[in-house]
Amino acid sequence: MGTRVTEQQILEYLCINIPHEKDHRLTNIERVTVGWSHETWLFDLITTVNGVERTLPLCLRRDPGNTLLRNLSNLETQFKVLQCLEKTKLLAPKVYWYESDTKILGAPFLVMEKVSGVCPSPWGKNGRDFYEKASRRGVLPVDFSKTLAILHTLDWKKSGLEFLGVPSPDRGFALAEINKWKSLIDVSDHQPEPILTDLIYWLEENAPLSQRVTLVHGAYRTGNILIEEDRISAVLDWELQTLGDPMYDVAYVLSDLNREGTNLLSNVVDRDIFFETYESMTGWTIDEKICRYYDALYAMRSVAFWMSASGLYASGRSDDIRLARTAWSVTVVLERAAKNLGY
Amino acid sequence: MQIKDTLMRISKTCKTVIAPSTQDEYAKTQAYMASVVLEKIALQIALEEKHDLEMASAYQALVDEVSLILNNRKYSKNLSSEIHNGLENFSRNKSRSGLDIFVKQLYLSKEALGEELVNKIKERVHVTMRADIDFRMEFAK
């Protein structure tokens, strides 16, 4: 679906945007095939400046308009968030350009720095082995926990992140998240699911009070971070970020959803190390009761994702058969949600 | 040949013939995924009739038992007609979507019905929803 992007189109765009350098060419071009979201290309731009060759590692992300999050994911917002994060201690890719003009590459896109590091998928055997070994060496688990604390304690007002929308006090954050995922379910054109209805009412009735408002990543886990020499070189996947309760991210780290065949949180960090590091760096106590609530909210969010994904395939907006497969993931998540609700 | 068997055969062809001989990584993944999807559809079709029969009787049992709860003297005095109408609608549309409407009605009538009665009905509704999801897990896993 959508238009194809050629190497030549990308090169022409970069020539226009870096006019004072010469002999532009692209090397090491790689189309990233994992993930459910924007199309991603990694490459090196080689140019000549005053007779000297220069290499600029770049990453281009394009929004074909049929990603899993539909209108809830916006590259312009992602661009602005990454710009704001440049002023903070949090490691994230530097962004160069955002283009909404669909005449250039057929869809909106952004160009950012290709940060060095690896990002093994935690869902395969190789990835699990990678994280388990890193866990034994001990540096990455602490860095993983510290980075989340840095993300939550950065000054979001000073960094200009207020544009993300400050949730109303008390239960405002949880209710806003519920409404966000309800809107995705509504556009997915899926058959009614009474367990989901029951879950949503339960979530609305039990929405917790937020103790504080911070930047929230929304999907902080292994697989969404780049790692170099056992340290995080960049936090990636800025699509679900919001301002809200930091326990929402903590719950994601604690969730069974994000580990497979191991007790290590997010496949990498021992629970005690995570608690000690995060609590000592933030000065806050992790509220496990609230985290359990957010775990239930993640079940609703997962259902919304899979309903949206399978709906995109069913309606012909995407040809990716992986999306069709997620129709059955809805059942799996609902079964887990029912268990968590006590039946 | 049954439709389930045909789909299973195509699934196997995707997995053992088409995917391995496809060079392009994206197309190869798609072929493997098509195999998985066809297998699930085949299993779902094979179990559908049994599932529908079992759920029809589960929905009928739910209607009967919730009627008994609502007719209990302890609750029947204060009941609005809305919940009776809701149950009647569900008994006319005994399906997952009918149950979904009934669950919504139950929550919306919570104040009028009182927590104790709502919880009692919910407890019974949960038994039916559990039966449905357990059936579906047979082909969703």
Image: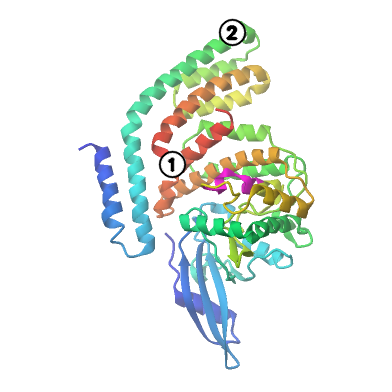
- Structural crowding at the residue carrying mark 2, measured as other residues with C-alpha within 10 Å and reported as few (<14), some (14–19) or many (≥20): few
Q: Is residue B44 visible?
A: yes
Q: What percent of the width, then of the height, locates residue A10?
A: 50, 75
User: What residue occupies the far bottom of the structure in this picture?
Assistant: A51
Nearer to us in this view, A264 or A35: A264
Magenta run includes residue A255: yes
Q: What percent of the width, then of the height, locates residue A214?
A: 74, 52
Magenta residues, start to end: A251-260
Q: Which residue is mark 2?
A: B72
Q: From what the image shows, is residue A315 above or below residue B22?
A: above
User: What residue occupies the far left of the structure in this picture?
Assistant: B1
User: What residue occupies the far top of the structure in this picture?
Assistant: B73
Separation of marks 2 and 1 at Cα, in angstroms: 40 Å
Tell me where residue A211 sits by quadrant: top right
Magenta run includes residue A11: no
Numbered tag placed on residue A328 in the rendering: 1
Q: Is residue A299 left or right of residue A154?
A: left
Q: What percent of the width, then of the height, locates residue B125?
A: 53, 22
Helix, strand or loop at mark 2: loop
Q: From what the image shows, is residue A261 above or below residue A13?
A: above
Image quarter in which the N terminus of chain A is found: bottom left
Helix, strand or loop at mark 1: helix
